[in-house]
Image (tube, rainbow, N blue to C red):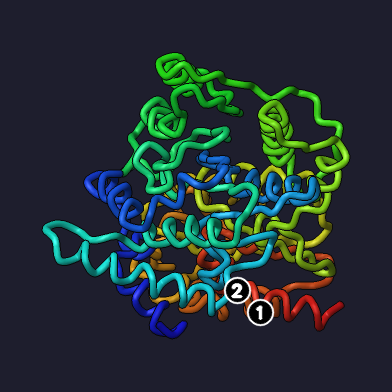
Amino acid sequence: MTYDEAIAFWFARINYEVRSATPADLKLERMRAFLRALGDPHDRLRIVHITGTKGKGSTAAMLDSVLRAAGYRVGLFTSPHLERVEERIQIDGVPITNEELATLMGDIAPVVRAFETEPGQGPTFFEISTALGFLHFVRRRVDVSIVEVGLGGRFDSTNVCRPRVSIIATVGLDHMAQLGNTVEEIAFQKAGIIKRGVPAVCGVQEPAARRVIDAVAREVKAEIRTPSDNMPYRLGLLGRHQIENAKLVVATAEVLNSQGFSIPPAALAAGLVHVRWPGRIELVSRNPHVVLDCAHNVPSASALAETLATEWPVTGKRALVFAVSSDKEYPAMLRILAPHFDTFHLTKYGINPRCVPPETLAEVLLEVAPGKAFRLHETSKGAWDAARAATTPDDLICITGSVFLAGELQADVRRCAATSS
């Protein structure tokens, strides 16, 4: 396969980033059979498995940085991506190359096509992503693989692995159509990554959710470790919520050290301060302040609002460039964000049918925050250009609501920051 053929083959499969998954889509039997046909690569990896409504990506990035600082060769599997799909599969901070992707997809494609001749749905976009990650990590002989759950946990395609340690960062209301309408139901789905006899690190503080997680752990005889309140290290990521994520990393390092890893305090210090995770409350430039973010649910919007209020007390006006997917709790997100902004640039990303029309966002904004100034834009670039044209050096622009929006605008935002510095 050529690279272009590999990408075309991959994106031709069912893509739940275009069509939302349904509960019927969430099952593991197909993934197990798919990986069995590929030689069960996941069984040859030392894995740390991470889930959470908010914070799992940042936790994965911090742990990746810490393990690399400790001298390990680290595979990192995350989703979704900002700009290029290759970002999902990295080794030591370097995404899989076009050539590597084409070679792996050439090996995987015949297996996928064979499954597609059988009754039922063949491997999906995300299942192929997961298989690519496992195979790449095996072939490149990584020392440890950090694997982020795509959706929920219990029936996520990554949950075929048997990790060295599982991490549950947070539990909140998101993906409710797939995971349930209460924190207890969602907690049960996320607790599904806890394996029999495998230690787990849990940062969940909400009592009802924590009771569910603890009950699942007792049932499978897995030790649950709660992170210490002590955080003696400086962090490279912004926001008080990142302190909680860093505590998870420190506790995970302790578990791994008890299993024969060597992650000294110096590696924790270096990894936590030097971590880079683009598009997560990232201050891209000053004068004006420009913040690029991926908040796409209520807990993430709350973390963003708190960080904006404490980290950047700008003297000028604040503008929000906002687009969001239809399966998110966007009325609640706008209600949280509205007090922190003077002007709203409501837009959409790409041609993805899941994106909420700007006109719908305007109706919601008028209801949750009457009197707020807003403009509608057919393209995200138009929204960014308009926000930028209206700002002074004392102002702030924040781009948020979706990973897709942040990815679509990232290059323009960074280019503008470079030319203005």
The residue positioned 81% from the left and 83% from the top of the image is 419
> How far across and how far down the image is residue 82, in percent?
57, 66
The residue positioned 58% from the left and 35% from the top of the image is 169
In the picture, measured across the screen, residue 402 lies left or right of residue 282, that is left
> How far across and how far down the image is residue 379, in percent?
49, 78
> How far across and how far down the image is residue 74, in percent?
66, 53
- Would residue 299 be seen by someone viewing this image from the given angle? no
Residue 104, located in which quarter of the rendered image? bottom left
Residues at badges 1 and 2 in contact (C-beta under 8 Å)?
yes
Between 320 and 244, the residue placed more toward the observer is 244
Q: Residues within 10 Å of mark 1 (few under 14, many from 20)?
A: some
In the rendered view, tell whether residue 73 sits above or below residue 240. below
The residue positioned 47% from the left and 23% from the top of the image is 209
Q: Residues within 10 Å of mark 2 (few under 14, many from 20)?
A: some
The residue positioned 81% from the left and 40% from the top of the image is 268
Residue 409: image tag: 2
In the picture, measured across the screen, residue 66 lies left or right of residue 9, that is right
Between 67 and 141, the residue placed more toward the observer is 141
Q: Which of the image's four quarters has the N terminus?
A: bottom left
Q: Describe the element under mark 2 as helix, strand or loop.
A: helix
> How far across and how far down the image is residue 390, in percent?
70, 76
Residue 14, located in which quarter of the rendered image? bottom left
Residue 302, located in which quarter of the rendered image? top right
Gap between marks 1 and 2 measured at Cα: 5 Å
Provide the residue designation for mark 1: 412
Q: Describe the element under mark 1 as helix, strand or loop.
A: helix
Q: Which of the image's four quarters has the C terminus?
A: bottom right
In the picture, measured across the screen, residue 100 lies left or right of residue 115, that is right
The kind of residue tagged 2 is Leu
In the rendered view, tell whether residue 316 sits above or below residue 417. above
The kind of residue tagged 1 is Asp
Q: Residue furthest left?
A: 119
